[in-house]
Image: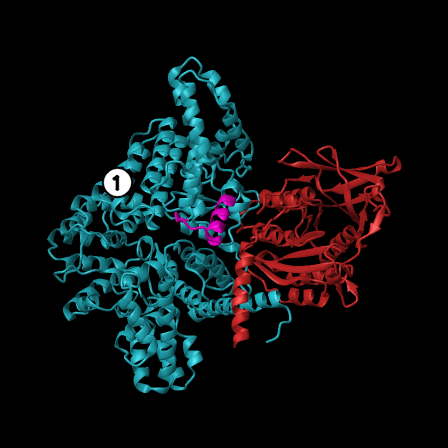
Chain colours: A red, B cyan
Amino acid sequence: MTTRLAVASGLVAALALAQDRPTFRVKVDMVVLSFQVTDSKGRYINGLKPKDFRILEDGIPEKIATFGEGSRPPVQVAADGTLRPIIPSEESRTEGRVVDAFIGTNVFVLFDTSNYMYRGFVYASDAIADFIRGLDRADSVAVYTYSKNLKREAPLTHERTDAIFGLRQAVAGDDSALYNCLLLTLRDAAKVPGRKVIIVFSNGPDNASMVAPSDVQAVAEDEGIPIYVISTNEVNKDPISSQVFKRISQRTGGKSYFAKTWQKQVEAFESIREDLGNSYTVTYYPQPNPNEGFRKITVELLTDAAKKYRIQCRPGYRPRGGF
Amino acid sequence: MASYFDALARINGPVKDYLTEPERLKRFYTAIRGRVTSPGPARPVFRANTDMLLLTTRLRLDPDGKPHLPGGMEVWKSLFMNHPAGKYDAKLTHAAPNWREPDDVLEALFGLCRKAVENEPLKIFMALSDMERNRAAPLQTATVERLARDYKALSSQYALFSEAPTVSDRTIVQFLDTIHSVNQVHDPLLKADAAGSMQALAALWLIFERQGSISPGDADATLAHVLDPFEKIQNEREVFDAGRSGVKTLLAAAHSPGNVSPQDRMMDLVAGGVSDNSDAHQQVIEDMIRIFEAQKLISLETLFELADNLESVSRGEKLNTALAAKLASRISEIQLPRSQLTGAEKNSLSYGYWTDRHIEAQRKLNLRAMIDKSANDAQKLKDLRGALAPFLRDTLVGFDYIHYAPPGAQVLHTNPLFVRSHDFIGIQNANETWKATEVFGTGWPANAGGRLVGSLASLPYALAEAEQNFLIPTREQALIWGDLVPQMILTAVIPRWWNVTPLQLHWVGVHMAYAETLLAESALDPERRAQVLATLSSYAQPARVNRVGRMLMAGDVGAAEENVVPSEMYLLADQLAPGDRDTALAADIRRIAAQAPEQVSPREISRIFGTPKPMLANTYQPELLNLRTFPTLMGYSSRILAESWESNLLYYGALADDTYIRPAELNVLIPQWTQETVERIFATHLEDWPALLRSLRLVGDGVREKARKAPAAAADQLFGGLSH
């Protein structure tokens, strides 16, 4: 009894002490930048090294902190340009496998289950399941569905069966609030460290969102999360939605696909998988830059041979406001 | 007949006795039924409207035992005989001159209930009755006449008077006159700035009055002073001056220290106006500042300092370039309004036109150029501060938005033009300026995002509606979602907990615990069971009472508890505790009531744990009406269904008592808990109240679990493997 009282009073004293200790929070904005390099025929160029390109932000050269290609583990780039492997922490080892948010891609699939998708629902579900099965082992995937509200069918996981199980729980809904739900997905993805992408599978019309596509695009740009859109509509059937899709995907470093048939949807997913597998991902801590507005990012290839290659990456971002 | 019975079965006390007097019963039923009964059996049995339910629920009797008629008989005769917008009913217009007794008016109101059209006289009757409910003296006849006459155009503004019973007749008329005066302004942009600033200040006044920052004794004079400068608006400078004067009046009425910046003090007042250094208060203020920054609003301090500087420029001094640069830098963050209308649609007859102009005018502001242009005209230099009026309007409107920001809000953080886009004009000539706030512009990818249109009168509900779909259900979207969720959000946002005492939380906690004891005893004691079911039958539907009775007889107390909602538990305990001399918890309740009667009086408990009822009671002032939950009906009655659910805050209060949470923390926790409750609802039909209760309990279980684990986790952290 005496011991318990002593412990209790000690606990109270310790808690009081903890409350007196000041807490310092420091915000460090690391920029995660993914990009693909293709030649004039659209073929991916692999095997480039950090010395082959440079990153500029508003014209200011940036020092690359880490570099990775595809789903291979990233490496640290030292000040002299040498590359060193990053040693994973003990916590990131699970069942003999390194599970690290910075290895592989964190893929968020946002599946439209509104009335508009009713006809092609089962085919869409199958195409997404196929895509999930084909992801690299290092990748993790989350499955979200939406109609008027978002539903997290499967949170971010490495387990493919869990993701597909969640996908198969999806039921058809009613109205379509694509941009509301895309915003919520972005908010979730922003909390995950490392590289992430969002893949929207929809046919476009939105009749219930409160937020505008451009506001959602701004959030995606600032968070550095590429958005890929697979629309099940033909591009000229809903030109407004099509234009919005193209803009959102281009501005965030993603791509848009218009895939009316199941076959084309599978091809679109295959293309996205290739994009993910052939991307370069670099991180850097921005050099001092007085521009608190939109900062333009440029990736330049340094070798003469490489100068004819095409680089696809997001145009830039706004420094975080701290939502 | 069924609807009439239902309307009467819900009420108790003198009003029920009055209405069920045999002659009266027959008379009012004849009025409801009417003479023409076709299509007879083919008439749908689905209840037609809620008006009758409202009438019987909210009717009051005067001390002489007669129904209370706001303003007296002549007002109602005149309303039916001489209505400016045309007759309500030809027969009633014909009969009205012969009305002598209040029952004549009641009969007319009952008669109009059977019509498919909107029962405006009843709505006027309810609005005015609610306005008079808590007043020390009834409204004067002339005031009632004026309110009845202006009801069609201005009814959404009346909730302000219901909530603040100390507002005098003079100020009510002044408010209505000021509205008419602002409506005379021809320039839509000037009108929007004047109306927006006036409404924003009135809404802030209401917030401060509700939370006690302005004392009831000062409320009337403060509102009158705020309104004064708006009575004769002719240009933007006058709008700015009126806005600034309103801010000063409000801050003075809230006893603001002289050396605090108006921006800081206003933010502090909007956050509750209490001198509380708790983490909860800090978090509330930080959340509010975050929204203020996300909306790119200009601080009061900057605006007022700049106005003073512009005034001095008119006297020949120089412009303070640092201040001007500060404003310019903020202006540069205002984005272009996104194109949401085609070229052909862009005219004043479409929504969004005037808000685009409002935002565009702000973006183009160049003070230096304006000063240079006005250099030789002393009057123009003086009027320069009028250029700041649109910014001041947005800042004031922003404070109202910030105060009512729902939990999980996304639009306020994502769309930096949301506050600026509040459309006070709407389509020109549609007179939206004083109408209820509505959400407009959802869906459709080319739009500029949803925004709010109309006045600020129902801003809390409109904001809740706008943000509700950002809550993420853990199950499929509940059937009652669209009607229930905004009301639940209101319940989380409007009541504040800064001045609530632990004793008041404990009062509710003890009541809940005692009610659980009563239910447990009822399983074993038939006499107690009869007592409990008889009490419960006043508040719950007969079918549910019978179900609970069967469960108790079978000894299944757990199942019975899941079918009695928290508000009914509270009322059960409240009714039975005074007469129970055997139970310790009942004794505890009596002891607290004796020790602190003012803290736990029915009025005080109603104010703290009640819910806002803008449809049912024409006010956002929280109160407990102890009603049976309303059925699902058509039209606006779906909101009344949601408003009749009064259990959330009682449940959370008991939970806080159980887990030793301080009242101030509830300002942060209740919005979070409400969000979780909503996200966990899984209902199977439109009146599935037990589903809401299950969701509440899930959240409660989670909180209790966390509370149990927290000290253990802290002990582990401190003492590692210490064994004892």
Name which quarter of the figure residue B628 lies in.
Answer: bottom left
Near-viewer residue (B356 or B624): B624
What's the residue at 64%, 68% (across, down)?
B720
Whole-percent x, y for residue B43 in the image: 33, 66
Residue B389 position (above or below residue A45): above
Residue B27 position (above or below residue B124): below
Q: Chain of mark 1?
A: B
Near-viewer residue (B309 or A190): B309
View extreme (right): residue? A305
Residue at image mark 1: B221
Secondary structure predominantly adopted by residues drawn in magenta: helix
Type of residue at label 1?
Ala
Q: Is residue B290 magenta?
A: yes
* Secondary structure of the residue carrying numbered label 1: helix
Whole-percent x, y for residue B9 in the image: 27, 70
Name which quarter of the figure residue B552 lies in.
Answer: bottom left
Residue A4 position (above or below residue B117): below
Whole-percent x, y for residue A165 in the image: 67, 68
Q: Quadrant of the N terminus of chain B?
A: bottom left
Task: Give the extent of the magenta segment.
Answer: B272-291
Whole-percent x, y for residue B448 in the image: 54, 41
Q: Quadrant of the C terminus of chain B?
A: bottom right
Report whether B508 appears left or right of B306.
Answer: left
Report whether B95 appears left or right of B541.
Answer: left
Q: Can you see residue B365?
A: no
Near-viewer residue (B722 or A304): B722
What's the residue at 38%, 43% (across, down)?
B455
